[in-house]
Amino acid sequence: MQITYGSYLKVPELLALQVPASRDAASGRAEHDEMLFIVIHQVYELWFKQQLHEGDRLARCLMSNEVEPACATLKRMLTILKTMVQQVDVLETMTPVSFLSFRSFLSSSSGFQSAQFREFEFLLGNKNPRVLAHNPEGSVEHAAIAARWPQPTLYDAFARFLAARGHRVPQALLERDVTQPPQEWPEMQETLVDVYKHHPVERQVCELLVDLDEGMQEWRYRHVKMVERTIGFKQGTGGSPGAAYLRTTLFNPLFPDLWAIRTRL
C-alpha cells in the first residue's frame, strides 16, 4: 500500500480525537472555544511526549560522557520549551466567559492528571509522591509515573557526567536517594566554580541546564497567570486547588547548585 502524508501521520485518526464534551445531541453544536481548549492541551501532551523522548536521551548522553549530542539535545529541549510557553498566548485569547461556557462539562478531569507532565517533572528532579494520587492505582497513567519514581534525575546524570570527566563530585551526591527533592551540595558548588572558571566545555553544559531550569520556571509562571486570568482564584477543574496551589510551585529551582554559585563567579 502506498504511504501518503495522511496515512504516515495518521491524520484522519488524529483529527477524530477532538470531541467536545459540550456538543448538544440534538443540534450537534458545541461551545465554540472548547475546540481550542482541546487542541491546545492535546498539543501539549505531544510536546510532553517529545520532551520525555529528548530528556531520556539527554540523560543517556550525560552518563556516557557524550558532550556534543548532550548539548544538541538540550538545545532542542529549550526550543520546544519556548514553543510550549508561546502556546499560552493562544490559550489566553479565550475569555473567562468563553471558558465558563463549557467548564462544567470537564467534570472531574484536571491538568493535575497529566501523567506525561508528572513524568517530565520527575525526570527533571521535581519528585512529589502526592502526585501519584491524581491517577488511580492500576491505571496506565499511575504506572507510568510510578516507573519514573526510582529513576535517576537529569541532575544525577549531570553529576555522573562531571565525575566521568575527572571533576570532584561528592560521593554522597553520586549515591544519593534519587527520590528526594533538589537540594544544594556545598562540595559540588566548589567543583562547579572551578568548572565555570577553567573548563569551557563543561561550562556550556551547565549553562544549558540553567536555561532549561529558567525555561521551566517561565512556563510555570505563564501557566499560573493564565489560570488566574481565566478563573481567578476559584477551585480548579476536578477539584484541584487551582491558582493558589500553582503559585507555590513558582521560583523553585531544579538545579539549585547552578544558581547558588552565581554570587561567587
Image (cartoon, helix red, strand yellow):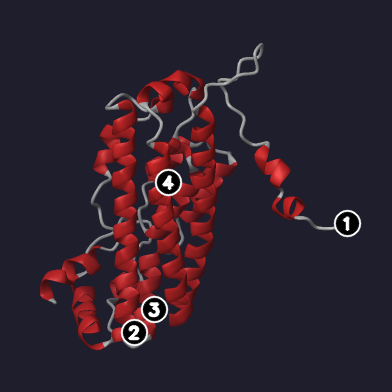
Residue 247 image point, x, y percent: 25, 40
Query: What kind of element bears circle 4?
Result: helix
Q: CA distance from mark 4 to mark 2?
A: 33 Å
Q: Which mark is residue 201?
A: 2
Q: How many marks?
A: 4
Percent x, y for residue 184?
22, 64
Decide which of 224, 113 is in the foreground and name it. 224
Amino acid type, mark 3: Phe
| Distance of label 4 from label 1 (alpha carbons) | 37 Å
- Under mark 4, the amino acid is Gln
In the rendered structure, find residue 1 and report the number of the disc placed on it: 1
Residue 46 percent across, percent down from the top left: 55, 50
Check disc 1 and give the amino acid type.
Answer: Met
Q: Mark 3 vs mark 4: give the one in front.
A: 4
| Marker disc for residue 87 | 4
Q: Looking at this view, name the residue that lies furthest to the top.
A: 26
- Identify which residue is drawn at 37% across, 73% down: 158
Mark 1 or mark 2, which has the lower sequence index? 1
Q: CA distance from mark 1 to mark 3?
A: 46 Å
**Residue 189 higher or lower than 133, as above or below:** below
- Mark 3, Cα crowd under 10 Å, few <14 / some 14-19 / many 20+, is many
Image quadrant in which the N terminus is located: bottom right
The disc labelled 2 sits on which kind of residue? Val
Report, in whole angstroms, how far the alpha carbon at label 3 lies from the one at label 2: 12 Å
Q: CA distance from mark 3 to mark 4?
A: 33 Å
The disc, 3 or 4, on the residue closer to the chain's N-terminal end is 4
- The residue at which mark 3 appears reads as 161
Mark 1 nearby-residue class (10 Å; few <14, some 14–19, many ≥20): few
Position of residue 33 in the picture relative to residue 246 (left or right): right
